[in-house]
Amino acid sequence: MDRFSRTTDGRNWLLVASFFGGVLSSSLVWYLSTLKSHGDENSRALFFLKGAMNMDDIRESLEELKNILNDLPVSFDDLKHRIGELPAFKKRRPWPWDRRKRKKTQDSVEGKHGEEGSHHSSADKQNSFNGSSPASPSLKSDFCIGSIFGMDVGGTLAKLVYFEQRAPVNSTTDSIGHRDRLYRNAASAQTVFMARQGLQSGQTAPNFTLRPLRQSSLVDLESNVDRERHWSDEKRRKSEIAISSPKRNTPSKASSDDLLHLKWMRQQSEPDNLQAYADSVDNPPLPKSTSFTDNALDDLDHDMHKNQSQPTNSMRRSRSMLDFSRDRAEALDQFYSFARRLDSYREGVKDDKLSFYSRELQGEFHFVHFETRRMQQAMDLIRTNNLHLNIKKMGATGGGAHKFAAEWEKELGIIMHKEDELDSLVAGMQFVLRTVVGECYSFRPATDTSSTSSVNLSRATSFRNEPSSSFESESELSLTKGTSVNGQEVEGVFIPETPPLAVDEWWWSRKVRRDTVSSSETYPYLLVSIGTGVSILRVDGPRKYERISGSTIGGGTYWGLIRLLTDIEDFDDVMRMVANGDPTKVDMMVGDIYGDKSDALEKLGLPANLVASSFGKLVAKEDPASGLKQEDLARALLMMITNNIGQVAYLNAKLSKTKRIYFIGNFLRQNKISQRRLSYAIDYWSKGEMEALFLEHEGYFGALGAFLLSQNVNEPSDAEEKAGRTEVFFKPASSEEKKMTRRPSL
Ligand SMILES: Nc1ncnc2c1ncn2[C@@H]1O[C@H](COP(=O)(O)OP(=O)(O)O)[C@@H](O)[C@H]1O
Ligand SMILES: CC(C)(COP(=O)(O)O)[C@@H](O)C(=O)NCCC(=O)O
């Protein structure tokens, strides 16, 4: 979708329409005056002045007007106070489809915004537009709300996590989605895990104690909040003991059923079945006398605040707003209401579905991202909304925490409190694994091979193909219930009667929740972070990891090449597009080299429809682009990069003797095709010995970890450490404890 139609879509229509009305007249005057000075340069746009004669002409004219507006010193996005888009930067040879697409670029703006060193001029422009003065520490109040943030600025995306202290939301009175309800009401994953261990094994489960947050130099919460949290923690601790101690926790029939039910759901269910769990938690099975339920928390909240006036608007208020000093509450209020409005600026900036409630910290985490190349616009946005005035310092990690630190300090007066990138990554992941129910998942075949004759047939008659050969047929994958081609349906997934040879991973489509928390059995594991580049860590314990490898072929490679090869400017559009691509038009197959029916193939052990060379088919074509859709290129490229990462991951897992491979990073965001491919590939190469695992918050662990580390959340006590229970806590490794393998540069 081009930029124009996206901005005029849906709810933005009114805004754009009124904006057009306002700007039309002034831009006409402006345009007439600039025409004189630009002469021929603008002759293309003269048509607009000649008057529109029909609908096509009008459309054409509007396009021209849009281009004119795009050249204005203040962009649309600035006017809308949102994180704007960078325009496409055309520098490549046009593809056939280029003819179809409309000009939608603001090359001149890219020149100003896109590269390092240009930030100040852009900021100045913004300042002159909105009239706000440059950030200056002297403008700051004497309190800081920076302690609610964690930021991770990577090569492609900047991720921001913020924390909102509040009591659990009563889902019956709050109109929130089912996943939100699930996250907010579910017990922590760790608690559930411990409780079930106790119930199932009959052994004494260790008491799961929760320590109050320690105040660090960054934590500037009011002391009354700490007191309250301590009080709440005490109560909650008792309830946790009640849950985890077999002696006191002779389970009621209800709780026992609930846990069994939960086990079934988390091990085997499709994600949506988790709704049932959320519902069951809405009516807590544990007796009130022994458990600190959501209702109890609500009661507590009510008791604490019954004398305070309640907010009159419908916006949900965090407890922090009520507890903090008035100034601080106002600053937080301002930020939270700004953050809520972020949803409407652009879908996907705020990942609402990922918000989760932490009972441990009694608050909710929210997740926002934007492209790092838009850093200047993000800073402008912060300044325009005066969000920086009450932030002195915030936890930050990733390369950008170093690269942009000086600018943030100079322009916004915000000091980036730098946390180690890999420490943060592991800390964030650890925290989410023990907090969020249903965080981890994997992909399995749609059904057991034994139950589907057609699949058996396929397995029996096909070669055991290299995963890199397989063409994942999205059309088959996307067939759903009710589809009636020659095949059958198993668990909602369509199994064609005769699956094509060499198509193995297409039926690895069943998303299965995995019951994984940070317990000692989970180590060691391989952590493969697919960000701009790829980092590979072997994790041996909560504080023990080693960066064992990496690869330069990662998400940045994919996105960079996609921008070069196609006209797509929104990563989410790529993910929608690849579903319709056919990589066999791009990749050279074994059959293309040997011929489809060669006897030599059997000896070689490779089928004709195996990919011999990614993109190899384009070598022999006179015009490599002819007959190709950009979908085909995008799909072939996705498979190429995914296969490469899978292979590197597998080899590293083998070298490190790890059976579990967690794949994280935003390359996998909304990218089920790569996830399924990795699942299949790891299973194939390891002959079923290893498993690929994925996490719902895949791209946010660094930012979350930066928050946790900067706030010293939950350091274990010495006693806990001695008792061998450190796996439920995280403490950053000291530099001696960390072994960083340094490889020579390539
Ligand atoms: N909205 C998006 N915009 C750009 N890239 C995205 C987006 N969503 C996912 N990606 C993919 O995620 C990669 C960045 O992943 P991330 O884990 O955030 O790495 P980094 O920290 O290096 O920026 C990109 O290179 C791209 O492949
Ligand atoms: C330099 C990085 C750690 C930065 O992390 P990222 O922003 O890509 O998530 C990563 O890109 C990486 O490990 N690259 C691969 C370098 C190599 O091992 O060859």
Image (cartoon, rainbow, N blue to C red):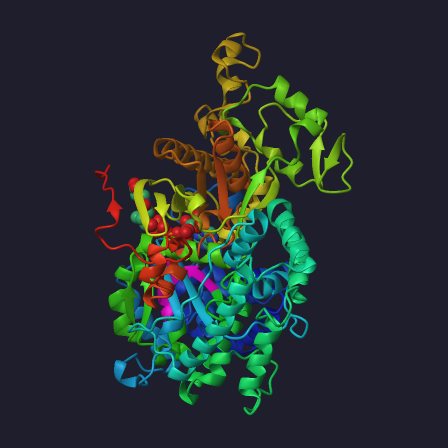
Q: Is residue 224 one of those drawn in magenta?
A: no
Q: Is residue 653 left or right of residue 453?
A: left
Residue 577's x, y, as percent? 56, 45
Q: Position of residue 266 (x, y in %)?
A: 60, 49
Q: Residue furthest front?
A: 247
* Left or right of 256 in this view: 6: left
By secondary structure, the bulk of the magenta-drawn segment is best described as helix
Residue closer to the observer: 564 or 107: 564
Identify the residue at image location x=42%, y=54%. 430
Task: Residue at 47% x, 28% y: name it.
Answer: 685
Q: Quadrant of the C terminus?
A: top left
The front one of 438 and 242 is 242
Q: Is residue 433 left or right of residue 491?
A: left
Which image quarter: residue 582? top right
Would you identify the image quadrant in which residue 78 lies? bottom left
Residue 314 in percent (x, y) is at 61, 81
Q: Residue at x 28, y 76 (%)?
A: 413
**Above or below 454: residue 31:** below
In front of the other: 392 or 513: 513
Q: Which residues are magenta?
A: 367-379
User: Is residue 109 at all visible to an observer of this figure?
Assistant: no
Which image quadrant for residue 629?
top right
The residue positioned farthest toward the top in the image shown = 599
Picture residue at 64% right of the left edge, 25% below the top: 500
Q: Quadrant of the N terminus?
A: bottom right
In the picture shown, does residue 286 fall above or below 640?
A: below
Q: How many marks?
A: 0
Give how far across and how far down residue 533 sits, in percent.
36, 45
Between residue 334 and residue 325, name the one nearer to us: 325
Rendered position, 387 above or below 595: below
